[in-house]
Image: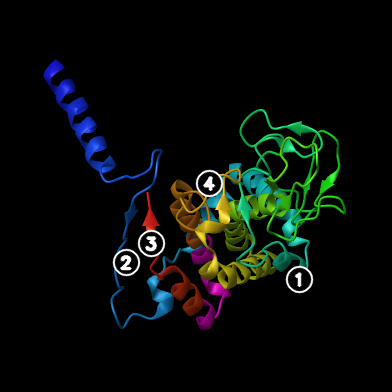
Amino acid sequence: MKHEIWFAVSLCCLLLVSCGQGKRDTGIFPSQHPVSVKTPPQGIPDRDRYTKYDRDAILKKVTEDKRYGDLIENTRKSVGQLVSMSDEQLRGLIPPANTKRALMVHRKGCPVHGGGVSVYQPFGTTVDLSLPLQVRCPIGGEVYPSRDFPDDGQGWLDDRPDSPTKGEKYYFVGWFNHWFLQSLPARIKMLGQLWFLTGDEKYSRTAQVLLRRFMEVYPDIDSNDLTYDGTDRGVYIKTTCTPWEGPALMNLTDGFELLLPTVDDQFIRDYRDLTSTKYEVRF
């Protein structure tokens, strides 16, 4: 057993050393790995490339098991605010592709009240849909960006003479942009589930508007516009942090497949083109 442990540790060390060779700078730098995308079989209609579900069988099960009632109602509440929005309002939640995306407004927190003593604080990770492309300070209650703290999507540069963060940027719009896009696939999946189970077209309509807008910006989204706290650039795969990208796109496709009966063939082709694009992945 000891020999096995020694061998495993030695192998890990060897891999770490070999992976680190050739690095000219100190620190952690993700290496680049090309990812191949398999071409799907030819001659299959676009609609048949996706999973289809036996809706009658699923509805029968849901009807017979009363436990699903509370789950469906809770899901309704989760997306209620989105469903109440107009198409224009929904599209406005997703800004142009070159808008910055930031996990944190700033590592110090709020520009007035601070509070950045732990990860993602004090703003957290949940956007307020009543404040699109904005963020409210949970300490003072003020909303950013504002007249004194403007942000055109590229961040607000602190130019206050005596500020300890002078010369650094605060990403108010970027914070909303990142965390809404991060939550979008799960929201679309919930909307797809609700349409599938209830047949209410408002859920399909909301999901399609959001998905269409996301499909417009996704091809031009650049990982260089994503930052953790303004100090790192270009170390992510594309839209979000590398470990989160795959599950997010899987959720998106799960929701899309549930909505298949409600979308036309052109919509399906557009989605296929979006998800079959080759991207460079960096780990």
Q: Mark 2 — residue?
A: 37
Q: Is residue 148 above or below residue 109?
A: below
| Residue 12, image x, y percentages | 23, 32
Q: Nearer the viewer, mark 3 or mark 4?
A: 4
Magenta highlight range: 255-267
Amino acid beneath label 4: Asp
How far, Cα to Cα, is label 3 from label 4? 18 Å
The front one of 173 and 160 is 160
How far, Cα to Cα, is label 1 from label 3? 33 Å
Amino acid beneath label 2: Val
Give the mark, 2 or 1, whose residue is nearer the N terminus: 2
Please tell me whether mark 3 sits on a helix, a strand or a loop.
Answer: loop
Please tell me whether mark 2 sits on a helix, a strand or a loop.
Answer: loop
96 part of magenta stretch: no
Q: Nearer the viewer, mark 4 or mark 2?
A: 4
Q: Residue at x 65, y 53 (%)?
A: 180
How far, Cα to Cα, is label 1 from label 4? 33 Å
Give the mark, 3 or 4, whose residue is nearer the N terminus: 4
263 part of magenta stretch: yes
Pointer 1 and pointer 3: residues touching (CB < 8 Å)? no
Where is residue 97, by image quadrant?
Answer: bottom right
| Residue 29, image x, y percentages | 39, 45
Give the mark, 3 or 2, whose residue is nearer the N terminus: 2
Q: Is residue 230 above or below residue 112?
A: below
How far, Cα to Cα, is label 2 from label 1? 35 Å
Q: Residues within 10 Å of mark 3 (few under 14, many from 20)?
A: few
Q: Mark 4 — residue?
A: 232
How far, Cα to Cα, is label 3 from label 2? 11 Å
Q: Mark 1 — residue?
A: 88
Q: Mark 3 — residue?
A: 280
